[in-house]
Amino acid sequence: MGKILDAKQLMEDVANWQSPQDLLETLSGMEQNMALYESGIQEIRTKLEILQRDARFKEGHNPIESIKSRIKRPMSIIEKLYRKGFPISLKSMKDNLNDIAGIRVICPFIEDIYTVAEMLTKQDDLKVLETKDYIQNPKPNGYRSYHLVLEVPVFLSDRKEPVRVEVQLRTIAMDFWASLEHQIHYKTSKEVPDCVVDELKECAEIIAHTDERMQRLSKQIRCIGDTLDR
Ligand code: 0O2
């Protein structure tokens, strides 16, 4: 995740690079495309809700705590294209950005993340375009999550459109950390002081350790429960 640019500065920079007419056309085209991304989110969300219900019924354990979704705002799309050096156009947005439609799945335990990811990626109408395991390989700042980029077919009145949706899976604790880190990052265009960066990283390590302990504890509690049931 790169540093967000100040909005005014961004528009000035983009205007130097692209004519205002082209920029307006791109922005209005983006609005029209958002319905398609909303439909992609709806398709994946339905799949997740079905998995959630089925697992709760069969395993007696719900691997999904909550599901959130969002569509990236037009300004954030322009900012990300500009930051990554891609042209600012509708085609470029579709070709180069995987996270315009985003779903965040919050799981109780680390193992649940891999269970949900496997259940989802096994579905044969979904294409897995990318997998990033930031749990096995955390980012240098301490960020942990499991990312999937999926392509889901959306059936419209006259055609079928493949839509990319980014699914981020994380534990409750990872989400707590990432929300604060995101806020700090996005609240200011100034550099974050080193002491804050270091403390955040330290918190990420503590959280990762706690997630592992909670996972072990949950297994022990389940074993105790099984023994008492017998
Ligand atoms: P937003 O506001 O959530 O949409 P990037 O790392 O973003 O330059 P790429 O290839 O899209 O490039 O990266 P990646 O790693 O798949 O990350 C995509 C999204 O993951 C980000 O979207 C964030 O939502 C989340 N993410 C990735 N790294 C971090 C991080 O270090 N901290 C936090 N809090 N979230 C992260 P956006 O567009 O950056 O943000």
Image (cartoon, helix red, strand yellow):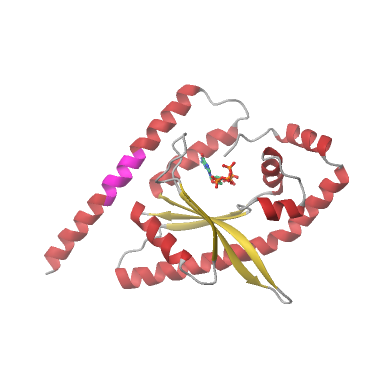
In the picture, which quadrant includes the N terminus?
Answer: top right
Q: Give the range drawn in magenta.
A: 207-215
One can see residue 109 in this view: no
Left or right, 33 with respect to 3, comes to right
Q: Which of 113 and 183 is in front in this view?
A: 113
Tell me the quarter of the picture where residue 205 sits: top left
Task: Kindly identify the residue that appears in the image at 83 percent across and 41 percent down.
Answer: 18
Ligand 1, image quadrant it occupies: top right
Q: Where is residue 194 in the image (x, y as percent from the top left)?
A: 49, 23
Look at the image and say whether residue 214 sits in the magenta stretch.
Answer: yes
Task: Kindly identify the residue that appears in the image at 75 percent across and 33 percent down.
Answer: 8
Picture layout, residue 114 above or below residue 133: below
Q: Where is residue 125 in the image (x, y as percent from the top left)?
A: 54, 71
Residue at the bottom extreme of this rendering = 157
Q: Nearer the viewer, residue 68 or 93?
A: 93
Task: Kindly identify the residue that appears in the image at 24 percent across and 50 percent down.
Answer: 216
Picture layout, residue 2 above or below residue 58: above
Look at the image and say whether residue 90 sits in the magenta stretch.
Answer: no
In the picture, which quadrant includes the C terminus?
Answer: bottom left
Picture layout, residue 13 above or below residue 87: above
Q: Position of residue 169 (x, y in %)?
A: 45, 53
Instruction: Name the magenta segment's main secondary structure.
Output: helix
One can see residue 122 in this view: yes
Q: Where is residue 138 in the image (x, y as percent from the top left)?
A: 43, 41
Q: What number of labels is visible?
A: 0
